[in-house]
Amino acid sequence: MIVRALPADAEALIFDFDGTLYTNAAYARYQEDSQVARLARHLGIAEAEAAARLEAAREARRAAGLPKTSLARHFLSFGVDMASIVRWRIEEIRPAEWIGPNPALDRTLAALARRFRLALLTNNPREVGRAGVDALGVASRFEAVIGLDDTFESKPAPEPFLAAALALGLPPGACVSIGDRVDVDLEPALALGMGAILVDGVEDVYRLPELLTR
Ligand SMILES: [Mg+2]
């Protein structure tokens, strides 16, 4: 766990979902593969060809010295409209098939909720985010769930972070973004004046109450 910034007057914690509140490599792989399969059907090409085009687009950004961008932005660049991107995810991604109740996480979030307001910020549609925290048995701990269809932008764009702060009625400087990816979850939050904590999966989340509620 790496604390990049922690405002003394922080009032809210904004959690990433995938790779932060649970770790399941097979589920992470399925999420992308399922969307690449839909892209292939949409473009009328083989799945391997769709995967190759995605990798080529990622490589082109790397070669140009550009930062990584979201899967949604890549799909937009392939001519897929945002409504389809949102719908494909809702149709294909069912968290309860991959992850289950986590009482230790629920105890952790309950402890944090005594001191902070909690929000979830995911690059999946809001409905998938809600189904995710529901599958983990922690839905009641979050007073706001912000997803792709709230701003139609994805982290690392600033809009989703601002939407999360707005949903809580707080300035960005009163919020702390917690996630597993520096470029996606931390850097854009820091640029907005938020605090930022890098975690390496849910085991690090278990340590947050000791760090934040002393
Ligand atoms: Mg993540």
Image (cartoon, rainbow, N blue to C red):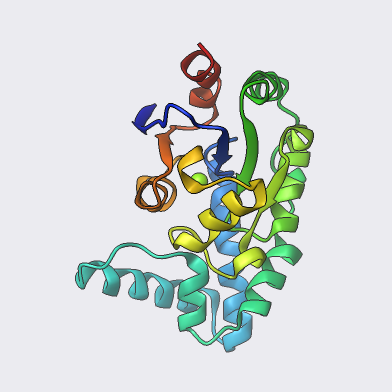
Report if residue 200 is visible in the image.
yes
Q: Position of residue 105 (x, y in %)?
A: 65, 24
Q: Is residue 177 visible?
A: no
Task: Pick whichever, 192 or 140, lies toward us.
Answer: 192
Q: Is residue 205 above or below residue 47?
A: above
Q: Is residue 65 left or right of residue 51?
A: left
41 to 105, vertically: above or below: below
Residue drawn at x 62%, y 22% is 115
- Tell me the quarter of the image containing the N terminus: top left
The answer to which of 70 and 29 lies nearer the viewer is: 70
210 or 183, which is in the foreground? Answer: 210
The picture places residue 119, in percent across and down from the top left corner, at 64, 42
Residue at image position (64%, 58%) is 147
Left or right: 165, with 185 as reference point: right
**Image position, residue 210 (x, y; %):** 51, 13
Q: Is residue 210 above or below residue 78?
A: above
Q: Is residue 152 left or right of residue 7?
A: right
**Residue 42 falls in image quadrant:** bottom right
Residue at horizontal 60 percent and vertical 83 percent from the top: 81
- Classify 13 as above or below 42: above
- State which quadrant residue 66 falls in: bottom left
Residue at 54% across / 75% down in the picture?
Answer: 47
Count of numbered marks: 0
